[in-house]
Amino acid sequence: MTDLKHTPLHALHVELGARMVGFAGYDMPVQFPDGIMAEHSHTRAHAGLFDVSHMGQVILSGAPMAGIAAAFETLVPMDVAGLPEGRQRYGLFLDDAGGILDDLMFANRGDHLYVVVNAACKDADIARMKAALEPGVSVTPVRDRALLALQGPAAETVLAGLNPRVAGMGFMDVATVELDGVECWVSRSGYTGEDGYEISVPERHAEALARALLAHDAVAPIGLGARDSLRLEAGLCLYGHDIDATTLPAEAGLTWAIQKIRRTGGARAGGFPGAGAVLDQIASGPARKRVGLKPQGRAPMREGVALFAAAEGGEQIGAITSGGFGPTVGGPVAMGYVPADLASPDTIVYGELRGKRLPLTVTKLPFVAANFKR
């Protein structure tokens, strides 16, 4: 624990009474005194403030945007060249077999791409980008900025109180905005299924901005525990759990993220790692699929629970990759992989819990409808 890194908000978390845990090499708040259930519900009803400074922030620059975009398209199966200035897109790093090495966000900020990657993968992701893109494109990790997420239906009102401009931003818009007297990089996006913003702020100003947001009656500090239950209800993947190098995009239900121009028949089809396997699976359909699962009882079924097609006998058909209690749903929820012929909503499968097979109902994702600002 002594080797854990601290985010710029660490002292504030401790002051606010957070229970701290090691996560991706950082000492992070898993919950605050009100508890995970209350934090989850507060975010759904009002606004929650999350510290996501452990994520990796990276700038791709040093060439005209057309060149940066073309280079980045050799690493991701997304349409980078067609992303307008001031817009952000979800992306994937893949290996040569089409397996997912990380998921990420990238934004066109005019003269550079701004990339945000997962904390546990950021060193490998930065090394991957440097090896593939430099020297033609400069890959610069951002090490002097914190990253905050303000999420929930009151997020717009709260942040607009610091700068009215943010109210005019749509889902996945990005902009440089002055907040509390400081230049911030703001995107209208998040990881909860709610409306909200992610805010990159110089680390020396991060605590002051966080305190300014928390001073609003609608805002509460939120830890990793509620972040996980919120994203699970929203049907959003957690890297290393719901997606990893053994998972191809079509299996994970992420085909929507691969624009037509990068698919078979598109003007810039292929040209990314694992393109053959990825595009073949999109065309033929995956043998297994990620699905929502609702246990038919009150007991949550968590990651690793084996799934079966029948209440007795037969071989394992899949496994739960994320699971827990969904406070908004009012019961246990899970995600996992099942054979494609068992992936239709209302199909019954069975999870083995403490030696007993208990039924789950395959359910369409998300469990809670998205509330993004369109």
Image (cartoon, rainbow, N blue to C red):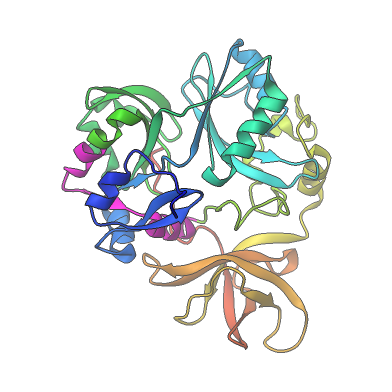
Q: Is residue 91 visible?
A: no
Residue 221 falls inside the magenta stretch: yes
Q: Is residue 93 visible?
A: yes
Position of the C terminus by quadrant: top left
- Relative to 12, 68 lies left or right: right
Image coords of residue 48 (percent x, y)? 30, 49
- Relative to 97, 303 lies left or right: left
Judging depth in this view, the residue of 223 and 290 nearest the camera is 223
In the rendered image of this protein, does residue 196 appear above or below residue 79?
below
In the rendered image of this protein, does residue 75 appear above or below residue 296?
above
Q: How many marks?
A: 0
Judging depth in this view, the residue of 214 and 142 nearest the camera is 142
Image coords of residue 294 (percent x, y)? 52, 72
Residue drawn 61% across the image and 57% down it:
242
Please identify the quarter of the rendering in which residue 93 is found.
Answer: top right
Residue extending furthest toward the front: 2
Q: Which residues are magenta?
A: 210-234
- Relative to 58, 18 lies left or right: left
Tell me which secondary structure the magenta stretch mostly adopts.
helix
Judging depth in this view, the residue of 239 and 232 nearest the camera is 239
Please identify the quarter of the rendering in which residue 189 is found.
Answer: top left
Residue drawn 75% across the image and 25% down it:
268
Position of the N terminus by quadrant: bottom left
Image coords of residue 163 (percent x, y)? 24, 26
Residue 199 falls inside the magenta stretch: no
Residue drawn 71% across the image and 89% down it:
312
Please identify the quarter of the rendering in which residue 225 is found.
Answer: bottom left
Image coords of residue 350 (percent x, y)? 63, 80
Residue drawn 64% across the image and 60% down it:
290
In the rendered image of this protein, does residue 177 appear above or below residue 11?
above
